[in-house]
Image: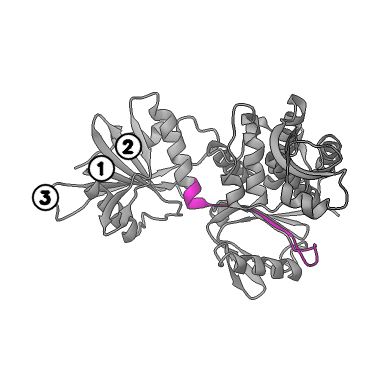
C-alpha cells in the first residue's frame, strides 16, 4: 500500500474529496482524534476541517497530511514553506536535519514524517554499531539452582512438592532494560505505519540486529523517570525521537486500521522559540543578555511573562513575538496592551512586537500616551527565510541600534 501525501497551510480548509486520498473515513478518524484532544487542532465543518495554528504532520489510514506555516494564498509555495518549517524545527532542536543522510532526501514522499523515521533509524543503527548497553536489573524466577536470595513466601507456594527447585530474587546484567524496550516499541510502531520501501528494508535489518523486547505501555511519566548517565548519554537522541513518536501515536485497538500519528507544533510557540534561539546565539558573541519567559507576579498568583527580555548596557528591552499575518499596519489593541504591561513591570522604555514579514509591511512605531515616563512600542517585521545568518542582528538593530524614538 502506497502512502499519499497532502500539503496544506495552517488555517486552510480540507474537504472530503478535495484530494483523492482524503476520503470520508479519513475525515471521521480525524474528527474522533480531534475530540479526544479537546478539539484543539482543527475546527470541524460539514465533511471538512479547518486547521488551526498547529503545523507539522498527521498520518491517518495511509494518508499523510503535512500542515505548513501560513502564507498568502497568492504566494503559497509548498516547497519554500516546508523548507522554512524544517529549518525552524532544526534550530529549535525538534529535528536534527544535518544528521540525515543524502539518501533520505531522495525518499519518494520526502515528507517531514519520513525524515523523523529516518532520523530515528539512523540513531538506532548508531547504537547497534557502537554496542548496546547492558544494565543491572532485579528479577525473580523458579530455578533448579540456588541463585541470589531465596523468596521464602513464593518458595512455600511454588515448591512445596518440588523440593529440588528454588524460587529466588536475583540480579542479572543484560540488555533487557527500559531504554531498549522503548526503542523496540518505537521500531514496531514505525513498522506498522511506514509506507516507504527504503525505510522498510532498513527496519527489517534492524529487527534482525536488535534484541526482541516485551511490549510495554508508555506515557509521560515513563520518559520523565529515565535518567541517562555516562554510559547511556548516546541514547538521548533516539529516546527523544521515540518520545515524540510514541506519545503522539494513537493506535486503534479494536480494528488496528485507524491508527493516527500526529507530530504537531503550535506555530506561535515555535516562532517564539526560534527567535529566542537565534537571539541567544547572537548575544553570546555580542555582550548582550537574552532571557526567555521571565515571569513576574502582577495580580494575586497570576504572572506576566514576556516572550523575550533583552538587556544591553543595563537598558532593558521587551520583544513579544506574534505569528500573525499583519496587513496594512493593522495591529491588535490586545497585542499593544501586552507590550505596555511588560514595559511597565520590567521598567523598560522600549518594546517591540515582532511579526513574520509575509506581506512586505514596513516597520512602524508609536508612543504610549498618558505616561509620566514615555514608553514606546515598535512593530517590527522580519523575513523567515532559510539559513538567514543575519536574522538575529536584524532584530537587534530594529529594537536598539536603529530604532528612533521621539
Counting residues from the start of the chain, the first of labels 1 and 3 encountered is 1
Identify whether 22 is placed above or below 387: below
Q: Is residue 256 magenta?
A: yes
- Estimate the spatial distance between the alpha carbons at disc 1 and disc 2, rounded to whole Å: 10 Å
On the image, the x and y values in percent for residue 180 come to 72, 39
On the image, the x and y values in percent for residue 165 come to 85, 44
Q: Which mark is residue 158?
A: none
On the image, the x and y values in percent for residue 273 come to 47, 43
- Estimate the spatial distance between the alpha carbons at disc 3 and disc 2, rounded to whole Å: 23 Å
Identify whether 286 is placed above or below 51: above
Q: Where on the picture, by quarter, is residue 84?
A: top right
Q: Where on the picture, by quarter, is residue 101?
A: top right
Can you identify the residue that label 2 sits on? 310
- Estimate the spatial distance between the alpha carbons at disc 1 and disc 3, rounded to whole Å: 15 Å
Can you identify the residue that label 3 sits on? 372
Quadrant of the drawing holding the N terminus: bottom right
Observer-nearest of 94 and 396: 94
On the image, the x and y values in percent for residue 118 come to 73, 39
Q: Is residue 374 magenta?
A: no
Find the magenta span and give its range: 252-270
Can you identify the residue that label 1 sits on? 350
> Is disc 2 surrounded by few (<14), some (14 to 19) or many (20+) residues within 10 Å?
many
Observer-nearest of 298 and 335: 298
Counting residues from the start of the chain, the first of labels 3 and 2 encountered is 2
At mark 2, the secondary structure is strand
Quadrant of the drawing holding the C terminus: top left
At mark 1, the secondary structure is strand
Name the residue at 62% across, 45% down.
Answer: 82
At mark 3, the secondary structure is loop
> Is disc 1 surrounded by few (<14), some (14 to 19) or many (20+) residues within 10 Å?
many
Determine whether label 1 and label 3 are within 8 Å by CB. Answer: no
Amino acid at each position: 500500500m502506497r502512502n499519499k501525501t497532502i500539503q496544506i497551510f495552517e488555517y486552510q480548509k480540507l474537504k472530503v474529496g478535495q484530494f483523492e486520498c482524503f476520503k470520508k473515513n479519513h475525515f471521521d478518524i480525524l474528527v474522533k482524534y480531534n475530540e479526544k484532544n479537546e478539539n484543539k487542532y482543527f475546527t470541524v465543518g460539514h465533511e471538512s476541517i479547518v486547521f488551526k495554528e498547529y503545523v507539522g504532520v498527521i498520518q491517518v489510514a495511509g494518508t499523510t497530511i503535512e500542515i505548513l506555516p501560513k502564507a498568502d494564498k497568492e504566494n503559497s509555495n509548498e516547497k519554500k514553506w516546508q523548507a522554512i518549517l524544517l529549518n525552524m524545527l532544526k534550530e529549535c532542536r525538534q529535528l536534527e536535519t544535518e544528521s540525515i543522510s543524502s539518501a533520505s532526501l531522495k525518499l519518494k514522499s520526502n515528507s517531514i514524517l519520513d525524515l523523523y523515521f529516518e532520523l530515528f533509524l539512523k540513531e538506532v543503527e548508531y547504537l547497534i554499531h557502537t554496542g548496546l548497553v547492558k544494565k543491572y536489573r532485579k528479577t525473580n524466577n523458579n530455578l533448579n539452582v540456588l541463585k541470589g536470595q531465596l523468596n521464602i513466601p513464593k518458595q512455600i507456594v511454588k515448591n512445596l512438592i518440588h523440593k529440588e527447585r528454588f524460587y529466588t530474587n536475583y540480579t542479572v546484567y543484560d540488555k533487557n532494560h527500559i531504554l531498549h524496550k522503548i526503542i523496540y516499541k518505537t521500531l514496531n510502531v514505525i513498522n506498522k505505519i511506514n509506507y516507504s520501501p527504503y525505510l522498510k528494508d532498513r527496519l527489517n535489518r534492524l529487527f534482525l540486529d536488535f534484541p526482541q523486547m516485551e511490549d510495554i505501555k508508555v506515557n509521560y511519566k515513563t520518559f520523565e523517570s529515565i535518567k541517562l548517565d555516562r554510559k547511556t548519554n548516546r541514547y538521548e537522541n533516539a529516546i527523544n525521537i521515540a518520545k515524540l513518536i510514541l506519545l503522539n501515536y494513537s493506535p486503534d485497538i479494536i480494528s488496528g486500521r485507524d491508527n493516527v500519528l500526529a507530530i504537531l507544533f503550535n506555530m506561535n510557540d515555535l516562532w517564539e522559540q526560534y527567535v529566542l534561539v537565534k537571539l541567544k546565539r547572537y548575544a553570546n558573541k555580542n555582550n548582550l543578555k537574552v532571557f526567555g519567559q521571565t515571569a513576574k507576579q502582577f495580580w494575586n498568583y497570576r504572572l506576566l511573562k514576556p516572550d523575550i527580555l533583552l538587556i544591553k548596557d543595563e537598558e532593558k528591552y521587551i520583544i513579544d513575538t506574534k505569528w500573525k499575518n499583519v496587513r496594512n499596519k493593522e495591529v491588535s489593541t490586545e497585542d499593544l496592551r501586552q507590550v505596555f504591561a511588560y514595559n511597565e513591570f520590567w521598567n523598560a522604555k522600549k518594546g517591540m512586537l515582532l511579526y513574520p514579514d509575509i506581506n512586505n509591511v514596513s516597520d512602524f512605531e508609536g508612543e504610549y500616551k498618558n505616561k509620566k515616563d514615555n514608553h514606546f512600542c515598535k512593530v517590527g517585521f522580519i523575513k523567515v527565510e532559510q539559513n538567514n545568518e543575519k536574522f538575529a542582528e536584524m532584530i537587534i538593530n530594529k529594537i536598539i541600534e536603529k530604532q528612533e524614538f521621539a
